[in-house]
Each structure stands twice: as structure tokens, then as C-alpha cells.
Amino acid sequence: MARNEKLFGAIIAGKKDAAVEAVSEAVGAKQDLEALLEESMIPAMKEIGDRFSRNEAFVPEMLVAARAMQAGLALIEPELAARGHKPLGKVCIGTVKGDLHDIGKNLVAIMLKGAGYEVMDLGVDCDAESYHKAVKEGAQAVLLSSLLTTTMTYMKTVMERLAEFPNVKVIIGGAPVTKEYADSIGAHGYAADAGGAVGAVSACLGRA
Amino acid sequence: MHTALKLAKAISFSKGLRVGTLDGFERLIAGIYGRPDRVPVILQPYIYAMSLHGLSPQRFFREPAPFVHASYNTARYFGADSWTPVFDFYDIEAEALGQEFNWDVQMEPGVNKHNFLIKDRRDLLRLKPPVPGESGRMPYVLESYRLYKQIMNLAPMCYACAPFTLAVLVRGLQEFLVDMMEDPAFAHDLLEFLSMEVIVPWIRAMIRATGCAMVVMSDAQASPPIASPSMLREFCLPYVAKINRATSTPQCTVCDTGTWGEGMVNDLREVLDIKMAMMRGGNTMHSTRPYYLLVWQEDYDKVGIPAVRAYAEEQGVCLMLNTSPLLVGSGPAGAIADKVRALIREGAGKGRFALLINMVPPGTPVEHVHTAVAAARQFGRYPLARDIERMKFEMPAVEPFEQWVKKNGLPV
């Protein structure tokens, strides 16, 4: 199935109504919904993420694109679930303890959902136990976010708490976080921005 | 000495008329306008002061005396040239408007993100402006400034929250960003209300109460990639200019700063131009104003110090760079000294440069902060040494903090 240009363009432009209309038309025309998701909707989110990584798009544009994506997805999700469509993987994400910043975390969650992952959003100010619980509930990857130098050190505490799960991948990011810091605490992945987080998760889970 | 005389002395010194020696304040002023005797060091005591004194956020951010005294002790102990009492300056106007904050925290209070004040247009229409100086923690701020003035015999630099960031605090970041895209008229109405009904009266009240020479609005949210440069031109700059026009006087400069994001755009100059417009917009008498270009470590690490140095020189303003809070927190001391040396070598040039030590993480060994200050003193002496790379860093002896406070500090 060829890419649905109307839907693809509507998501990138953040036009929620146009995205819903395009999805409705596709449903009405009995198009393959899995193909619609995988060839038009997920690529649209990937494109906006790539533009973000290239400094060609900014957070508001990503937000409205995600809203358009989610509005369109809401129309087809029940049908996809009924057909046994499975997400790429299950991940959890949260801002670490002591840190109340959530925009970066929210953006990454949006991008991961847009890329086809099931995302457990743990919120902000998350202690190590909340990540541990999410892994017990099936998260294959754990994403830790921090915007403060004063809170990023808690990532090491989370790493230690998750040590009993050798197959679970931990990916970290946030303004003060660096690749060097990720390596120093033994994180499996590092993302410099929201667009890069999807690639980091996919690489860690072998979905790249 | 009267502030005006100190200013005159410092500016004369910076231009080569070197009479006497400079104190910390004079060094900073000389560094803003030209070349002082050495690179000025500004320290933000903030939550590091809170932790050094074992204060709770509830006391530090609500009680003027322990807050100012702890900040004073910290700044003086480390020998900073300049400091101001830095509280959670983003929150004051929002709290005065009635925005809920979480105080059940270990560090600074934070907005309750489950209950933003402005959920829709009706909330904006219902909103009453604060009583300047009386609502929320505004009395705490004014009393803290009064104490600072009494202790330092110097008017403080005052802080306000800039309209863009204040809009984010009372509306929610995602909501406000979507407003800009989908309901720009609402976003403009909110910014207009916050600018003219909240921020302008508050800045006027601070100027009246303190006689300050500078009010700095802070605007961390008005930064790429949170907003694009074109959004900043539409939703940030016009309101900053309006506020500056309404409050700035020949004796008091009002400006907007604290933004970041040079490393998040492809056109560096576009963002630097916006930064300077945040400083200059709405002000007059530009040549006399203490403008500066503040670039944060995350950004200068990406774009390089020479690029921002060249821009600051072209604009005729002081370049201000911060030390990496992460590096200061983690050390080791040798790496801190080397970093300060590099910042000075690349940024300090012939003057018009200041070093900012900010957001020192609680728990940081005092030796790390002493190292940063001592390195700035040693490497930052003008004219900069030609062999600055080969100079051996010498760490002075450090007195334990508690011992110093006992002998020289103010009671907390």
C-alpha cells in the first residue's frame, strides 16, 4: 500500500481535524489499517522527529503532530487490537526522583507511541521502586529523564535497583545528561533529544 | 561610597583610568563595561547555600533572614565578587496570582502540574491581578532585598519572571505551546494580561522599594527548542519590549535573560539576535546600559566560545559564561581549574567578560567551588598571561565552612 499523503501531511502539519478526516476516509474505503499505521502514521512521526533532531522543527510542532497522530490513531486502535496487532515493545518512562520537569519526558513518550511502542508513563519525581514495579509489569526498556544536575545522579540509584533484571535495557537522557555520564553509570543507551530516543530504544531492543 | 560614585569609579577603571583598587561590585561593573583588574566572578548561592546551612526549603524560600544570611555567608565564604539573593524567582508572580505550588519537596518549590491556574479563557477573564508587594511571597522578596541592602550597603539586582515563562507556569507548558499554534489570540491575551497587569506593577514595586539599578526578568522557557525563533519573535519579544518601555528608567535597566538554546538551532545568529532583543527591546540610552550576553555551558559546548565571543564583541556587550554545574559538583578539582582556565582563555579577551557559578548541586565539596573561584582569580588577571596554558594552578588553603561562619558569618 502506498503512503497516504493526506494523512502523512496532516500529521506532520499538526492538523488534527485533517488527520481524523484522512483516517475516516481510509476506514470508509476499507484500506489495510496496519499498513495505514505503519506506512503513513508512524513514518510521519518519524519524519517530525528527524526534523526535530536536525533543528528544523521545535517542540510545539512535535506536540501538535502528536495530537494529530493520536486523534487519528484513536479511530483505528480498537480495530487494530481486535486483529491482534502488537506494539513493537513495552517501555516505561519517568523523570527521576526530586525532578518535576516533564516536557522532555512527555516528548519522548509521544515519539515512542508514535513509533509503535506501548508506553507506561510513570510521571515525574519517580523513585527507583516505581521503575522496578514497571519492569515487573512487563517493561522491556526503562527510560530515565532528568533536567537537573542535582537529580541526575539518582539515575545511578535506579540502575542499581534494576540490576536484578539483566535483560532490561535502561536508556537515559535530559539536558545535563551526557553519553559519558550514561557510560559511567552503566546505562545501555543514551538519547541526546526526543527524536534520538526512539532510535536508542529501538537499538537497545533490537528493533532498529 | 555611594553607588553612583562606585559606578563611576568602576566604569573609569574599565576604560583605563585606574584609580585605586576595585571591590567585588566595582569589578563586576568594570567587567561589564570594559577591562577590570581580573575576571569578575558571580556566585548564585541558591540551594547550595540552603544545603550548606541545613535549611529546609520551607524556611529558605519563605523566611527572609535565614535566606539572605545563608546566601551572604555562602557568597562571602567563597569570595565571590558579586552575588544577589537568588530565590525561586520564576515562581513569585505565579504564586501571587494563585497558582498552586508543591512545597513537599527537598529542593525548590514547583508548580502543581495537575492544577494549572488557567485551564481555559474563562479562567483568564476571572483572574484578578496580585497586589504588588503584598500578594503571595512578594513581601518575602521585598524584605529579602531590604536585608541585602542593609547588609551590603548596595541595592540588589531584582528578579522578575518574564511573560512567556510566566504564561507557561500558569497555563502549563504543553497547553501554552499548543495555544500558540492553535489559538494564538488566546495566547496573546494571556501574555498581555501577565505583562501589563502582573509583571509591570511588580517591577515598579521592586524599583520603588529597593532603588535598584537593574531588574532582570528570567525566561528559561523562551528558548529553542521549546519554541521556534519565529514564535519567540511573535510571543516573547513584543511583551518584553512593552514591559521594558513601561518600567525602565535612566537609572534602572529592565531586561529579559536566562534563555538558552543556541545549540538547538541551525542559525546561531538568529537566536543571539533574539537574545539581544530581549535585553535591549523597549529600553533607551543603549550605550549606557549594562547589557550582557549570557550563554550557558550546554550551548557554548556545542557552538564554541569563539562564536559567541565574536558576537558579543560585535554587539559591544559583556559575555557571561557559566561554569558547568555538573563539573563543579563532581570535580575533580583539577578538571574544574582547567575548565575555568579554558573559559577565560577563550572568552575573557580584553575584558567585557564575567564568570557565573550557578546551580551548584547540594552536596558539592566546598573545595570544588573554592577551586573555581581561585582559578578565575589566578588565570583571569588582566592582561591575560600569554602562557596561561602552562600556568600551574595553585589551590589556596581552605578554611572549613562551619569554622568560617562561626568567625565571620551571619546567624542563620
Image (spheres, rainbow, N blue to C red):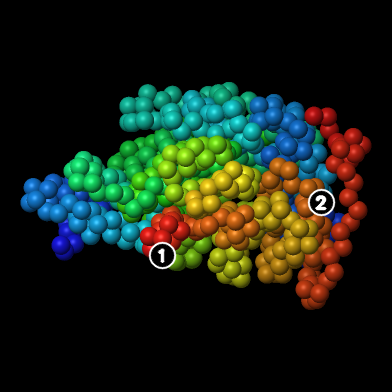
The residue shown at (67%, 66%) is B347
**Label 1 packing within 10 angstroms: few (<14), some (14-19), many (20+):** some
The residue shown at (55%, 23%) is B135
- Image coordinates of residue B139 in percent, x first then y, are 63, 25
Q: The C terminus of chain B is located in which quarter? A: top right
- Image coordinates of residue B346 in percent, x first then y, are 68, 69
- Image coordinates of residue B134 in percent, x first then y, are 58, 23
In this rendering, the answer to whether B278 lies above or below B248 is below
> Quick one: SS at disc 1?
loop
Looking at the image, the residue that sits furthest to the bottom is B386
Q: The N terminus of chain B is located in which quarter? A: top right
Indicate which disc residue B367 carries: 2
**Label 2 packing within 10 angstroms: few (<14), some (14-19), many (20+):** many
> Quick one: SS at disc 2?
helix
Residue B127 occupies quadrant: top left
- Residue A150 appears in view: yes
Circle 2: residue type: Glu
> What residue is disc 1 on?
A54
The residue shown at (77%, 73%) is B389
- Image coordinates of residue B86 in percent, x first then y, are 67, 40
A49 left or right of A69 in image = right
The residue shown at (56%, 24%) is B136
Distance (Cα) linking label 2 and label 1: 40 Å
Circle 1: residue type: Arg
| In-front residue for pair B134/B244 | B134
